[in-house]
Image (cartoon, rainbow, N blue to C red):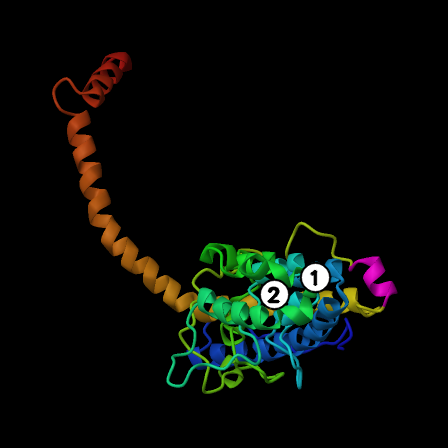
Amino acid sequence: MALFNHSWSDAPERRGQSRHTLRDMVKHAEGKVEELDAQFSEDLFRAVASGDRDAVAYLLWAGVTPRFQQVQAVRTIMQDALSNRDLEMAKLLSDHHASFMPIGEALERGADPPSAVAQTATYMWSWFEKNMYLWDPANEHLGCNHPTLLWLSGRADWLRGTAGVACKFHKRLVQVNSHYHNTYNLYPSHSTLRDTRTNPDFDVSHVDVLRSWPPRGKPQWPPHASVANATLRPATHFNMLEYWSRIRRLRRAEAAYAAKDHWKKLRMFVRWAMPITLYWQGQTQTHLCAPGGVGRKRDFDAYQADGF
């Protein structure tokens, strides 16, 4: 795990940089964020496996991506939560866009990969229903009325996460970790995380990037009990501050790269809105200065009050 004082070169002055240079800056910043995000995901998997909900909530709030699975794992992070009969943990992961696609549920021959959260949830429903006798034998008699199956078969907006992500790179990570990504990665480019079964058009339109960073609403220190029981590492707080610093640099690089497109959209809006604005300003002045209009009366009163 990187130390808090681990440093990397500050981005150069962005004004006047070419698009190619700005893109390289974004890729460099993505690689630095990916490095720590992948390492923090180890703590996230350990916290889910141990049922430490406070540690999981802290890491997700801090911006850590709930990756599909770890190397050589036999279950995904969502499967770990459900196999522990911890539905509240699963809902917490779902709210932060963890994948529902289970390992071991193969697609039908010729079937298209899932393109939305609701579709991956149907595969998780099938996996849990088949293995309910292992994970929750006491409630196996409930069948399709089991709380977990009712949740997985519920409305799509119940399953789509509502939590914001730290930056555009994290939004792309949500997409590539949506299903069938079983390679634990340390790569800066999200395209290298895909395999041939991943749908590049997986719907992440519901995932919003936070307007400010770092996040608010919780203490920046990790839960003391989670550090004491070794779920989280002693240096978690300092490493999290370094992680946040790298995300801030990435957000600035992303903003610099997108500035040209934003200015283009603004110019198009002004060119569209200016004639309309000038037209209605003219109509307003014509109405005010017409005979009997408020503007004409105020002008006449001011003329009389002037004393000439």
* Rendered location of residue 78, percent (x, y): 62, 69
Task: Give the prevailing secondary structure in the magenta stretch.
Answer: helix
From the viewer's perspective, is the residue at label 2 or at label 1 nearer? Answer: 1
Residue holding disc 2? 248
SS at mark 1 in the image: helix
Q: Nearer the viewer, residue 134 or 46?
A: 134
Which portion, as a residue range, is magenta?
A: 222-229
| Residue 256 is inside the magenta segment | no
Residue 53 vs residue 224: left or right? left
- Which residue of the protein is positioned furthest toward the left in this rendering? 291
User: Can residue 253 be seen by looking at this rendering?
Assistant: no
The part of the image, by quadrant, that contains residue 288 is top left
Query: Residue at 45% of width from left, 73% of height from top?
Result: 16
CB atoms at circles 2 and 1 under 8 Å apart? no
First in sequence: mark 2 vs mark 1 = 1
10 Å crowding of disc 1: few (<14), some (14-19), many (20+): few
Q: Name the residue under label 1.
A: 138
Q: Name the quadrant of the N terminus.
A: bottom right
> What amino acid type should be assigned to the residue bearing mark 1?
Ala
Residue 6 occupies quadrant: bottom right
Quadrant where the C terminus sits is top left
Q: Residue 243 appears at what percent x and percent y?
A: 68, 69
**Front position in the image: 274 or 240:** 240
Amino acid residing under circle 2: Arg
Q: Left or right: 97 with respect to 70?
A: left
The verdict on residue 227 being magenta is yes
For residue 197, what is the image quadrant? bottom left
In the image, taking residue 267 as reference, residue 4 lies left or right, namely right
